[in-house]
Image (cartoon, rainbow, N blue to C red):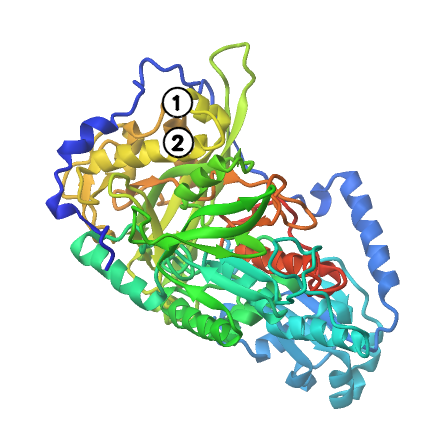
Amino acid sequence: MSLLQTNFFNCSFLSWSNDLRIPYTREVLSFPRLQTNRILCAAKRTGKRRYPSERKKLRTEQKEAVKKVKNKLEGVWRLSKLGVPVGDDPGKDFLGISDGLLQAIAKVIEFPVASMLPEEAFTVVRKSFDARKILKEAKFVYTVDLDVDTLLELEPRAHDFIFRLEPKIGLIEHVSPDKIVSGDLISVVNDCKRIKNDTLSGESEPRIVNGSGDPHQHGVGKSKPKIAVVGGGPSGLFAALVLAEFGADVTLIERGQAVEERGRDIGALVVRKILDMESNFCFGEGGAGTWSDGKLVTRIGKNSATVLAVLKTLVRFGAPDNILVNGKPHLGTDKLVPLLRNFRHYLQSAGVTIKFGTRVDDLLVEDSRVVGVRVSESADQLQSTSQDIKCDAVVLAVGHSARDTYEMLLSRNVELTPKDFAVGLRVEHPQELINSIQYSDLASEVRKGRGKVPVADYKVVQYVNEEAKDLSQSSSRRSCYSFCMCPGGQVVLTSTNPTELCINGMSFSRRSSKWANAALVVTVSAKDFDLLNLSGPLAGIEFQREFERRAAIMGGGNFTVPVQRVTDFLQNKLSETPLPPSSYRLGVKSANLHELFPAHITDSLRQSISMFEKELPGFISEEALLHGVETRTSSPVRIPRSNETYESTSLKGLYPVGEGAGYAGGIVSAAVDGMFSGFAVAKSFDLFDGTIESVIGKSQGAGLVKY
């Protein structure tokens, strides 16, 4: 247990609360008030609602898709948006080919007798559940691959029906072999090495550096390139995996503890309110996502080669196969812990040195190039255990809560830029209420995650137009949305400092809790930072701290969270006790959350909640409880890097990756970014030939964060 653990039972909150006054008065500061709030919700145009230019583009894409098909009677046809009514489907946990699905397939290919189609010819690629109110009935929606060779071998009479098939954008696609990912990341790297070995067969030894920090300098003593990977979250783990497979000498440095000890530290926090500042819900093996919902949903392409390589790698290390098929895959903390243990053991067997409980305090720089890192034991704030680790490159894969790392980078003149993010409150409802809102009569089929349909969730977004009070200023548009929705989950503490209070949501794999929670957040930018006289690259971090400290004061200390009924928040009044029950285990206290944020943020939240009620009737409820405060939705900082090499634009040998660097949001996108950075670093040291895109597909793009 760390010597820096803080027992809040023995700490007087009043002794520091006076130092945490917020330096603004709501009546004095001139926040732009919402004169009129227009709520806009963008919807995708379909059918006759499309613009002429959109219809023309669709026709062009359709013609190109038809031209690409060389032989209809070979390869794989992908059939999408196959709907099967709930009554005709075995349920969410069945991922095979049911009679109801065969009926849907037969309808698309116009085959007269569905029962004659052989199940062996079809593979479910994706399965999701659609219970939107605009539908006549709820249904499961499938994407299925049809293997032509297998189908014609088992049912030759299907020949003419396949011959008449035509591609249709979004519905029917002839899949080329290069779009099918056959293996996990380890298999992909091994294929690359096999191709390189075949190419270099009989040639001289490949070039290897000597630890000078420059891949283009050679010494007499040859050795593997030494790479330090800082951070044991998804981006760091996948970067380390790629580099280790390519033969680099990798040292993985994680300030937190391995999942076994980290679990004990989190238990001490939840049960005894003892915060270990280096091993908690944010820091430790697997990163912040380990003790979260374990969502694997991403907007960078669910069926893309890059995402599938990540998901198949997770399956290799113990994730259930259904994450490859589920439309909204998630693992849950109970599944992530053994998976990460297996991941660690594999890395160690591949030669990776893993240092837990080790914090990077500084970079070693010579001639504007990183040549190593200075580390100390995480429990040692005085850095008396400091030691230097020499390396040729540093992959910086810290999470968005590593605020001391950002400060260190700034002191080293590494370029940092402030980035927009979102802040708000976390709302909690009874899960049965959300089930009822979303499913109506089908709500009884949920059965705490063990029923036929999935535990209900929701995703809402609105756009608020703020009209400035000053006519010289133009109106701005602010998005307000739900974030990290955790069905069947609980609210947890994600503070890394005892004087600050912030929260998140988490769920276990079955999602069987009686609560549903989600963050309701609004976007903030440099304009919001300026209103609090905050500037510079770390202005966003100070903005976060401001409201985390205010939430701590509102709660009264001891990690007690300030709460308010949704109905009372809308009416600007303190909630009377008794309060609705909360899943947050460290205690809640009624507070005026409508006074937590500046008026323009509060007004945006209030207006959005009112509009959410129109989409989800019953959302505004006496049973709905708002918790404060949610601030760490994404990194408030971006570390500029090269789009091609992933190397920092201001310091050679430094490769900033993942969520903490501002290039990802969530487990999967962070893992993909780490994977691409691993290939980029391997290429810079001649461990990998060719282009990354030719092996694993296109990257999500530098600077693009998708959730």
Report the residue at 42% width, 39% height from top. 521
Please say if 593 is above or below 288: above
Q: Is residue 361 among the parts visible in the rendering?
A: yes
The three-letter amino acid code for the residue at tag 1 is Leu
| Mark 1–mark 2 CB contact (< 8 Å) | yes
Q: Residue 87's x, y, as percent? A: 49, 71
Q: Residue furthest front?
A: 220
Location of residue 497 in the rendering, given as x and y in whole percent from the top left corner: 28, 43
144 w.r.t. 363: above or below: below
Which quarter of the figure has residue 571?
Answer: top left
Describe residue 14's horizontal placement relative to residue 43 as left or right: left
Q: Distance between the residues labelled 1 and 2?
A: 8 Å
Q: How crowded is mark 1: few (under 14 residues within 10 Å), some or many (20 or more)?
A: some
- Name which residue type carries label 2: Phe
Circle 1: element type: loop
Secondary structure under the numbered disc 2 in the rendered image: helix
Vertical relation: 413 (above or below) 304? above
Which residue lies under the disc numbered 1?
A: 532
| Residue at (81% x, 70% y) in the render | 165
Task: Using the rendered view, name the quadrant where residue 191 is placed.
Answer: bottom right
Q: Nearer the viewer, residue 224 or 618?
A: 224
**Residue 364 image position (x, y, % from top left):** 50, 47
Crowding at dot 2, Cα within 10 Å, few <14 / some 14-19 / many 20+, comes out as many
Q: Which of marks 1 and 2 is nearer the N terminus?
A: 1
Residue that label 2 marks: 543
